[in-house]
Image (cartoon, rainbow, N blue to C red):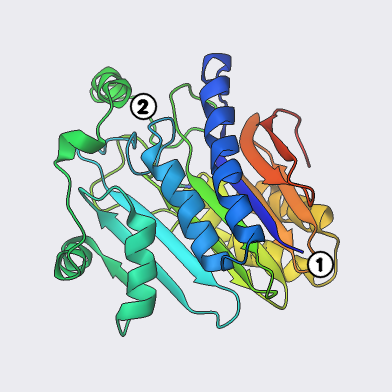
Amino acid sequence: MVRLIVHGGAWNIPEEYHPAHVQGVRRAIETVYPRLKEGQSALDAVEAAVAMLEADPTFDAGRGAFLNERGEIELDALIMDGASLDFGAVAAVQNLLHPVSLARRIMEESEHCFLVGAGAQAFARSLGIPELKPEELLTERELEFYRAVRDDPHFKPHHPFQDGPRGTVGAAALDCAGNIAAATSTGGSPRKLPGRVGDTPVVGAGGYADNRLGGVSATGWGESIMKVLLSKTVCDLFHTHTAGEAARRGISILATRVQGMGGVVGIHKNGDYAVAHNTPKMAFAYAGEDGSIVAGIESRLRI
Ligand code: GLY
């Protein structure tokens, strides 16, 4: 039994963006799931799936990320190994297409779990990871959006119902050895203060994996997701609830305890998939045992 599920953000995704979102999440499953079936590790699968979504300008991760208040891109990512509970995280890095891969190398090649900003970039440089020019991550869509909101005194970096492209990306996988992994990557929120870090790279908030429970990746309003450690909360609920119930209860805690907004995808250790959100929509895809792919924009409120 192997499993792979990805998401491309939970927000009020306008209809004109639906095809690109569905295509992006579907392509990640289509590409990575066959390799997972052939024996790829869960860690390699979540890194590969998230890297594809980072390279896709549709999403708020890697290329296509939001600009902060200074008009710069700062990226955050997390990867976690459910076998050992090792994780790697990176925050506020610039000029890298694949922060998830830097997070993986921090996990595997440093003495640390979490590096930020200039220090994280120096570590990337020491590993020979290529840096891009800022404009290589920038899309015309995000530049226009930044110009439209930068002087608006009423603009809030995170209002889940406001229009504008956004979409943290993430994945969870279960491999044929029974190992579970999760990964999440984001450009954060539009017009965020420089140095702002949301839920994504915070272990237990933006993602969590434990072979004894399952794996989860979260998306949405980071300031609220962090307060309830949403991904760890859902993983803990896997212990006593079915996959779907755990995800819905986690989102219900987010909504009622901190008036938060967001979504989760996950895999229960028994192999069942979990999808829940309280945003108007969420982009996600997963693979069935026979290789069939379910990909779409979920638009029902699931709690
Ligand atoms: N969930 C992504 C962020 O708030 O940064």
236 or 1, which is in the foreground?
1
Q: Which residue is drawn at 32% across and 59% down?
A: 91
Q: Name the residue under label 1.
A: 270
Please determine whether, in this image, residue 179 is positioned above or below residue 2. below
The outermost residue toward the front is 38
Q: Does residue 240 appear to the left or right of 53 in the view shown?
A: right
Q: Residue at x 62, y 52 (%)?
A: 34
**Which numbered disc flags the more N-terminal residue, 1 or 2?**
2
Q: Farthest residue toward the top?
A: 16
Q: What's the distance in space between the residues labelled 1 and 2, CA to CA?
A: 43 Å
What residue is shown at x 48% (from left), y 37% (from top)?
167
Q: In this view, does 292 lie above or below 98?
A: above
Type of the residue with mark 2: Phe
Q: Quadrant of the N terminus?
A: bottom right
* SS assignment at label 2: loop
Nearest the viewer among 196 and 134 is: 134
Q: Do the residues labelled 1 and 2 touch (CB within 8 Å)?
A: no
Viewer-proximal residue among 142 and 151: 142
Q: Mark 2 points at which residue?
A: 155
The quadrant holding residue 269 is bottom right
Question: Which secondary structure, mark 1?
Answer: loop
* Residue 261 seen in the figure: no
Q: Where is residue 262 in the image (x, y as percent from the top left)?
A: 60, 43
**Residue 302 % position (x, y):** 77, 39
- Give the foreground label among 1 and 2: 1
Q: Is residue 2 visible?
A: yes
Amino acid under disc 1: Asn
Q: Residue placed at 50% from the left, 64% from the top?
A: 44
Few, some or many residues within 10 Å of mark 1 (<14, 14–19, 20+): some
